[in-house]
Amino acid sequence: MKGTHGLAVRRAGWIGLIALLWALAAFAQAPEPTAPAVEPLPAAAIIPPAAFAVDEVPELAAPPEVTEEQAPRGMRSEGEAERRSNGQAPASFAQGAEGERSPSGQEPAVVSTPAQLPGPPVSLLEQAWLAPSADFDARVARTRRTALELGAWSLDPAARSLAAGDSGIGALARSAAAVELAPDLPAAHMRLAHALWLQGGSPMAAIRAVVAAFQAIGRHLEASLWFAGSGLYLLAIALVSGGLLAVTLTGLSGLLHAAHDLGHLFSRTMPDFARCAGLAALLMVPLALGEGALGLALGLLGIAVIYGRRAQRLAMLLAAAGIGLGAYPVMRYAGAALAAFPEDPVAEAAYAAAHGVSTPVEVERLSTLADSDALAARGLAIHARRSGDLGGADALYQRLIETGAGDVAALNNAANVRLDLGHMDRAIELYTRAASRQESPVVLFNLAQAYGRAFQVEDLNRTIAHAQRVGGELIAQLTALQGTDTAAFVVDMPLPPSMFWFRALRSHAGSDVAQEFRAPFAPGRLGRDPLAFAAAAAAVLVLGSGFGRRFDPSCWCKRCGDRVCPRCDPQGVAGALCDGCNKLFFAPEKTDRVLRARRVNELRAREERVDRAHTIVSLLVPGAAGLLAERPVSGWLGALCSALGVAAFVWHEGVVPDPLVAGATAPVAFFGVAAVAAVGYAFAVWTSLAARRQR
Ligand SMILES: [Zn+2]
Ligand SMILES: [Zn+2]
């Protein structure tokens, strides 16, 4: 009854876990550009991909009111985005742009320029991309400049659509443009590496692009959350399964002695099967209490501690600590990193505003919460600035600064808005405040631009020199983007990733994921309460080793494999050899010479057989090598490495689908982890086999 119940709970747990992961995935996964998805729109698809499609770049200046079809396409996608998130057909966007075009997109539709359309304002980012330009490079450079002005340091949606395009522009040029527009997106760097390898004919450049992809992970919020979550998830699985494996193997190795010695509590003449049944009943107590596999593992841990020496007790301490860490905090943080975004609508909307163009639903959400939530106010301010509403952005930034919620990025962006509004003095004051908090080259560059506009040449030269000292390379890039344009070019700073990280780590999403993860093997109190597990494991370790030190356990004779029990044979010599073997090897004068030679030959043959069997088991069962070589710590390491390797191999695409940020970085990273774990495992097995041979 209890068993079936446990099984059902376990099954339900696994199914629940899978369902949960899928749900997370569905939230985190951006729909393919062409997929008719109906899920709420994730951050990844905020800028409608078609807006950045390059299959028809209008060459040179088209008449202002005839922007071939990029505008309608972009807007139609925006309309789709809107429809996907609120379930309604957009009324305002699609005027004159509704899908009259043939699927191949051959018929140009005549519409007004985006800025003149009624309805929600079209993002300045889209306008920068869609406006006529001399060539593809000029379009990319102009969009990059606008994106930086608006604080979109990595314009991911543009990079994604460039990758999806299939136009006359070569894959290499498209990938390079994608990296230029979204330098923080690991997937874009990997696509560039691929294109360089295949078409660029420069393997070294391709390898540099791969390195750049890995460096980009830390700068990209979504990618770093996804990689951190997936990595911690794999680590938790490895710690828990490696620990359980090591505890189980070690506990099983002492099981028969434990059964025998337990029988002495009742009667010396108790048959073996009764002794085994007694021990089994004792071990089943945690199962009967509903503690599941984790409770059983604690019972085996007790046997392992009582029947082991110091090294084995240390290994069991490590294994128990690993199980505790993996099942509770590590899994909780993994869940927080993976689930925090989809479960936090404000963070999602703010992120969407910061990285592309928000949908009306997201803007509504942000404006409802802007008064109570600093992140919502930041997202709304970014959105207002992006859609050209300088007054709205200014009011939001000023309020943020007044309430003390302004960091360097807020001060800098507020100053940019003030500068655009023409309030020179206040802008310079805000830049100076931002620069005094952090020596940021971006702030200094902006301050220099403000001085330039105010004709304070001396201050300008001093500040730009300071900026070059702090971040020469970035200043060179910004100056190149500014080009010969004499208008002030100021750069917004992106939202600090720490704002999102703090929210993620504070969210309850992580504990729910961890609870689901534990449910299959720890359905009881131990699974719900980390302190209960810690207390139970500590009690088993302390009491077990205290008892084990005082108690003289039975063991196997090292030569013949018979049981040596100080209670069955109180007269026998204490030690690792049985009576017969002791006489045979240490008192040969008491034995018959011929019989002795025959017995020694038998034992030698047995030793060879046992040795072969041990080698096979060492190679086949992860963690067994260290145990058989009496190196239990390396046995635990072997179990850990094998679990990590298998997990990383199985989940080489990540534990939840990639939200279109990691791209080919994911399999490279996770196969890399699997390879390192395999090397670690091979090392543990090899050293254990070598140690056993030397004995
Ligand atoms: Zn013996
Ligand atoms: Zn005995």
Image (spheres, rainbow, N blue to C red):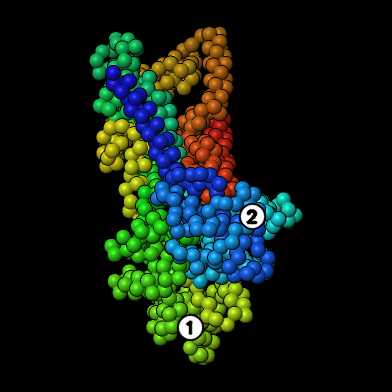
Residue occupied by mark 1: 450
Is 11 situated above or below 46?
above
User: Residue 261 lies in what quarter of the image?
Assistant: top left
Is 669 situated above or below 323?
below
Residue type at mark 2: give it.
Glu
In space, the residues marked 2 and 1 are separated at their CA atoms by: 46 Å
**Residue at the outermost right position:** 201
Q: Position of residue 278 (x, y in %)?
A: 29, 17
Q: Is residue 265 left or right of residue 649?
A: left
User: Residue 577 lies in what quarter of the image?
Assistant: top left
Whether residue 658 appears in this view of the structure is: no
Q: Nearer the viewer, residue 645 or 684?
A: 645
Whether residue 487 appears in this view of the structure is: yes
Reading the chain from its start, which is encountered first: label 2 or label 1?
A: 2
Task: Determine crowd level at label 2: few under 14, some 14-19, many 20+ residues with C-alpha closer than 10 A.
Answer: few
Q: Is residue 357 left or right of residue 426?
A: right
Q: Residue at x 56, y 32 (%)?
A: 689
Residue type at mark 1: give it.
Ala
Residue occupied by mark 2: 107
Q: Secondary structure at mark 2?
A: loop
Q: Residue at x 38, y 19 (%)?
A: 256
